[in-house]
Each structure stands twice: as C-alpha cells, then as structure tokens.
C-alpha cells in the first residue's frame, strides 16, 4: 500500500473511531509521527516538543531541535558552552559562547570547549592553558598558561580564571609570597608574604 493510501486508511479509521467512541466520552488521537518516515515532509523530521510531549514536524536546519535528520536535542545541548548556534550543512555550529566558556581550538562544530574558570589541564607536563583567556600556542602568556618553575613543589591550578598553585598535597609547605610560579616555597610560618620560622 502506498503511503497516501496508508494515511487515508488511518484517517478513515480515526473518523470511525471518533464516531464510535464519542458516546463513551473517549478521545481518539492519530499519531502521524508513527507512520513510516515520521509522516513529515521532505527536509523535516519528527521530534517531541519539550514540556508538552507533542509530536512535531520540524526543519532539519532548526538548531532548536539539532541539525540533520537523526537528532532532536538542541544544538546548545550537543555543543558544550554554547549560547547561540546555527546549522551549517546539517551540522550544529557555534555562533556565540556562554559566559566563562571559550572556543580556543577554532572549531565551531565542537562548541566552546574550554571552561575558562579552570582552563585545560595537561597532566603529563603539569601545565594548564587557556586560563581566563585562550593561550597563544606560539607565544603563551604566563597569565593564561599556568606552570611552575623547574623543581618547584605543588601543582599549578587555574582558579576562577587566574593562575595559582595547589599546596594541599605538600603540606605544611605553603605559597607564602603569593607567586605561583615558584610553587609552595615556604616551609615555615607566613606573615605579610614573608616566610618565617620553619615548622
């Protein structure tokens, strides 16, 4: 049976069902999305409307319902840290980032991949890039590229977009002079950023 014939049969049954069941106070709902291909026109797809659960036929180029024929999740859900998105060649694409998120790799199709509050950790080299702002790989700015001097104790951190040092693993050493690059340099009491008597 052709799709038109199938649809006509379903609608005919619907009319019959409404007439038969109306006296019992029942309702009859035809779910067009249950038909082959979702019952949607070319260039559209069947998705469920958030909050209502209604079946909808939406454009495959509507970022609110993802891009292409396969997905219905919003592009802002599929792409991390994005505020506004669009569809390009049926692929979710970043337009703008949410506050605190950055697109540092220049790939608009993987969203705003960096949380600037914590940066991007490189555990092998004990460094953190993209802290607060994207780090220039050719000329890294120390304010966005967190690392410790050779031999320094502790671990570099990006704390709310600012480079720092974590001394929790090397107590009682502490960062008395508030300079993150030389690590947890003080093994004594600290007063006015001056390291005093050893513990």
Image (cartoon, rainbow, N blue to C red):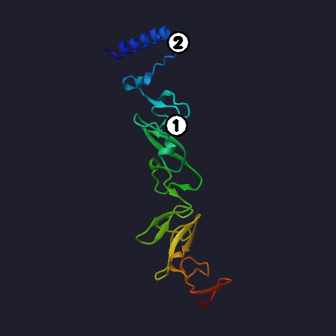
Query: In the structure shown, which secondary structural element does the residue marked by tag 2 occupy?
Result: helix
Q: Residue at x 53, y 51 (%)?
A: 81
The earlier-in-sequence mark between 1 and 2 is 2
Quarter of the image for the C terminus: give it. bottom right
Query: Looking at the image, can residue 137 be seen?
Result: no
Relative to 59, say whether 8 is above or below: above
Relative to 28, say whether 197 is above or below: below
Q: Residue at x 55, y 30 (%)?
A: 52
Count numbered badges in the picture. Answer: 2
Residue 62 image offset from top left, x and y in percent: 49, 34
Q: Which disc number belongs to residue 64?
A: 1
Using residue 1 as the reference point, say whether residue 40 is left or right of it.
right
Q: Quadrant of residue 31?
A: top left
Quarter of the image for the N terminus: give it. top left
Structural crowding at the residue carrying mark 1, measured as other residues with C-alpha within 10 Å and reported as few (<14), some (14–19) or many (≥20) = many
User: Which of 10/24 is in front?
Assistant: 24
User: Which of 55/96 is in front?
Assistant: 55
Query: In the structure shown, which secondary structural element does the residue marked by tag 1 occupy?
Result: helix
Residue 83 image offset from top left, x and y in percent: 56, 46
User: Which of 141/91 is in front?
Assistant: 91
Q: Nearer the viewer, mark 1 or mark 2?
A: 2
Q: Which disc number belongs to residue 24?
A: 2
Structural crowding at the residue carrying mark 2, measured as other residues with C-alpha within 10 Å and reported as few (<14), some (14–19) or many (≥20) = few
Q: Residue at x 54, y 74 (%)?
A: 166
Outermost residue, right side: 192
Q: Which disc number belongs to residue 95?
A: none
Query: Looking at the image, can residue 132 be seen?
Result: yes
Residue 25 image offset from top left, x and y in percent: 55, 14
- Measure how far apart labels 1 and 2 are at the Cα level: 40 Å
Relative to 56, say whether 125 is above or below: below
Q: Residue at x 57, y 50 (%)?
A: 98
> Cβ–Cβ below 8 Å for labels 1 and 2?
no
């Amino acid at each position: 049976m052709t799709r038109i014939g199938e649809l006509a049969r379903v609608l005919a049954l619907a009319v019959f069902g409404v007439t038969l069941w109306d006296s019992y106070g029942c309702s009859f709902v035809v779910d067009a999305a249950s038909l082959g291909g979702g019952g949607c026109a070319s260039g559209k797809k069947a998705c469920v409307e958030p909050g209502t659960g209604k079946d909808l036929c939406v454009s495959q180029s509507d970022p609110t319902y993802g891009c292409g024929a396969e997905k219905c999740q919003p592009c802002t859900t599929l792409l991390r840290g994005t505020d506004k998105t669009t569809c390009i060649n049926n692929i979710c694409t970043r337009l703008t980032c949410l506050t605190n998120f950055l697109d540092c790799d220049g790939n608009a199709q993987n969203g705003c991949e960096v949380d600037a509050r914590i940066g991007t950790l490189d555990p092998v080299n004990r460094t953190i890039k993209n802290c607060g702002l994207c780090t220039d790989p050719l000329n890294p700015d120390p304010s966005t590229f967190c690392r410790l001097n050779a031999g320094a104790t502790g671990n570099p951190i990006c704390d709310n977009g600012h480079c720092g040092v974590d001394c929790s693993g090397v107590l009682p050493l502490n960062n008395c002079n508030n300079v993150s690059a030389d690590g947890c340099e003080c093994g004594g009491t600290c007063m006015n950023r001056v390291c005093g008597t050893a513990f």
